């Protein structure tokens, strides 16, 4: 079902806003690391697409035990190598494989188009809350380096995003569901669970959304609205 189109809403909304791949680039750096890893592995039988599928399976398993972040991703690369390579995993090889992941931390912050000016504009009429998941140290560091912190009433860094987490955020800040929206690029983490929690949602697609974050957009319940905008800057057309 296509996301609906709505007119500009009244001031005083609560906008819960995702960070990675909504405010700034994130997954493109992981994709580059994966490409480097696949090239290094140089598997004799599996083409790159199959290696990726194995890696995604490993990541799904690994996230359950180690959560998100660069350290968890590095572990996944090492386990994928062990699963696919006939070559024994030496300490030197493990260090090399982990280096593909750790180089991600060296990238400067790269905002998506119109993000700072859009946040500045929205903050004049609405209350903004950053709701992002991942490793708390890594995510906190991104928030500080971004210089965007002052636009937000609060920053929530969570281990996972599901309906229960959104309900806790609503209760923690005393938000009214009818005037609360989740804004993000992930159907699985941002849109569908927010709708399930009784909130409205705004889908901002990103061409490089992580495979494990992709999914079908569910229909909004009768009490909620689902809006899709082509870019973050277009939020100003509706809010």
Image (cartoon, rainbow, N blue to C red):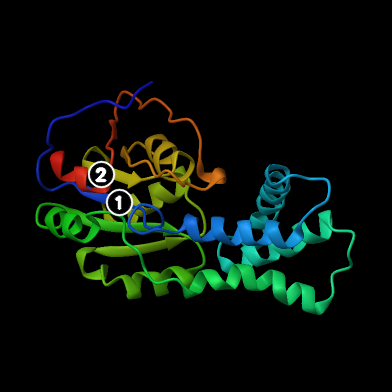
Q: Which residue is mark 2?
A: 180
Quadrant including the C terminus: top left
N-terminal-most mark, 1 or 2: 1
211 to the left or right of 152: right
Nearer the observer: mark 1 or 2; the answer is 1
Report x, y in % for residue 223. 29, 28
Instruction: Point out the residue furthest to the top here.
Output: 1
**Distance between mark 1 and mark 2 Cα atoms:** 7 Å
Report x, y in % for residue 96. 71, 74
Q: Which residue is mark 1?
A: 16
26 to the left or right of 68: left
Q: Quadrant of residue 120?
A: bottom left
Task: Count residues near mark 2 (Cα–Cα under 10 Å), then give few for <14, some for 14-19, many for 20+.
Answer: many
Instruction: Look at the picture and state if 140 lies above or below 231.
Output: below
Do the CB atoms of the residues marked 1 and 2 lie less than 8 Å apart?
Answer: yes
Relative to the observer, which residue lies in front, 143 or 97? 97
Report x, y in % for residue 94. 76, 73
Q: Residue at x 13, y 31 (%)?
A: 7
Task: Count residues near mark 1 (Cα–Cα under 10 Å), then give few for <14, some for 14-19, many for 20+.
Answer: many
Give the structural element (helix, strand or loop) at label 2. Answer: strand
Q: Residue at x 21, y 61 (%)?
A: 116
Relative to the observer, which residue lies in front, 138 or 155? 138
Give the structural element (helix, strand or loop) at label 1. Answer: strand
Question: Which label was assigned to residue 138?
Answer: none
Instruction: Look at the picture and state if 157 lies above or below 22.
Output: below
Relative to the observer, which residue lies in front, 112 or 8? 112
Report x, y in % for residue 53. 69, 44
Instruction: Look at the picture and state if 106 lies above or below 185.
Output: below
Q: Residue at x 38, y 20 (%)?
A: 1
């Amino acid at each position: 079902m296509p996301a609906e189109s709505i007119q500009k809403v009244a001031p005083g909304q609560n906008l819960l806003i995702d960070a990675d791949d909504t405010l700034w680039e994130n997954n493109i750096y992981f994709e580059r690391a994966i490409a480097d890893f696949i090239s290094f592995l140089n598997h004799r039988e599996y083409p790159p697409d199959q290696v990726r599928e194995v890696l995604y399976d490993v990541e799904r398993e690994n996230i359950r035990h180690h959560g998100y972040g660069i350290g968890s991703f590095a572990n996944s690369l090492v386990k994928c190598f062990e699963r696919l390579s006939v070559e024994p995993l030496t300490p030197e090889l493990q260090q090399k494989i982990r280096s593909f992941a750790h180089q991600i931390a060296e990238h400067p912050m790269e905002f998506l188009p119109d993000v700072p000016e859009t946040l500045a504009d929205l903050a004049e009429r609405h209350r903004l809350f950053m709701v992002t998941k991942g490793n708390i140290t890594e995510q906190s560091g991104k928030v500080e380096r971004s210089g965007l912190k002052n636009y937000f009433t609060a920053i929530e860094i969570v281990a996972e995003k599901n309906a229960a987490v959104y309900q806790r955020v609503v209760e923690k800040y005393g938000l009214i569901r009818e005037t609360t929206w989740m804004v993000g690029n992930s159907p699985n983490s941002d849109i569908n669970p927010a709708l399930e929690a009784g909130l409205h949602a705004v889908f901002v697609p990103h061409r490089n959304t992580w495979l494990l974050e992709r999914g079908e957009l569910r229909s909004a319940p009768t009490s909620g609205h689902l809006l899709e905008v082509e870019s973050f800057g277009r939020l100003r057309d509706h809010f």
